[in-house]
Amino acid sequence: MRKLMVTTFVSLDGVMQAPGGSDEDRDGGFEHGGWSVPHFGADLIERMTTVVRRADALLVGRRTYDIFAATWPLAEADDPIGSKMNSVRKYVASRTLDTVAWQNSTLLTGDVADAVRALKQEGGGEGGEIQVHGSGDLIQTLIEHDLVDEFQVLVFPVLVGSGKRLFGRGTVPAGLKLLDTAKSDSGVVISTYARAGKVEYGAMGPETGNW
């Protein structure tokens, strides 16, 4: 079974909306687009290059597809991220698109959750990694249906306030295990979590011995 990995840029207060540009996503009158850009240095770009190049497939929503399809084909042939984005198999979840023209793109049909479950089963048992980038609305569906195996969360040292959040309504309570953590030169904290069963509960205080 292929692993589904969500990689997301979030502000310290949990907002994931429009990290990469002013007009990326203005839903709800959002005016803070591009908040992640000043924190990208060579080390963070190198890390993201490593992540993207191990993808077996990309899974994206319509808005992210539109942005990627308009920009990545413009990349130079020797661009390590661009070459991978253009060549890798891409699956697009959308209720409004009829066709997808970006090379190696396939439009998912039917129920999104069922289609993603089927994608995870593909590969003849050889595994591989399906990566989700951006795609805030799609991520909410994946979380709601418990389809995410790992989260790679890049927390940027900025407070945005209002906006779309990574873990919104419909989040399924779940335990997580920290697999890796690192910090960029600009103060971005990169943490990777895997699913780890159900949430465990307890009590804290002097009377419990957990103090």
Image (spheres, rainbow, N blue to C red):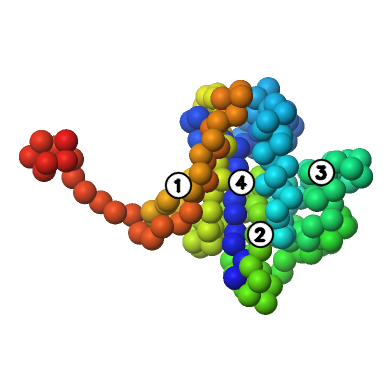
Instruction: Choose between 124 and 72: the one closer to the eye.
Output: 124
Mark 4: secondary structure: strand
Within the image, what quadrant is residue 70 found in?
A: top right
Q: Amino acid at mark 3?
A: Pro
Q: Using residue 205 as the reference point, say whether residue 186 is left or right of it.
A: right
- Residue with the most extreme bottom position: 124
Mark 3: secondary structure: helix
Q: Amino acid at mark 2?
A: Ile
Residue hosting label 3: 80
Q: Residue at x 45, y 57 (%)?
A: 195
Residue hosting label 4: 7
Q: Nearer the viewer, mark 2 or mark 3?
A: 3
Label 4 or label 3, whichever comes before in sequence order: 4
Residue 98 vertical placement versus 133 (above, below): below
Label 1 or label 3, whichever comes before in sequence order: 3
Residue hosting label 1: 178
Mark 2: secondary structure: strand
Residue hosting label 2: 130
Label 2 or label 3, whichever comes before in sequence order: 3
Quarter that holds the N terminus: bottom right
**Residue 136: where, in percent of width, then height?**
61, 46
Q: Amino acid at mark 4?
A: Thr
Q: Residue at x 67, y 33 (%)?
A: 44
Within the image, what quadrant is residue 111 found in?
A: bottom right
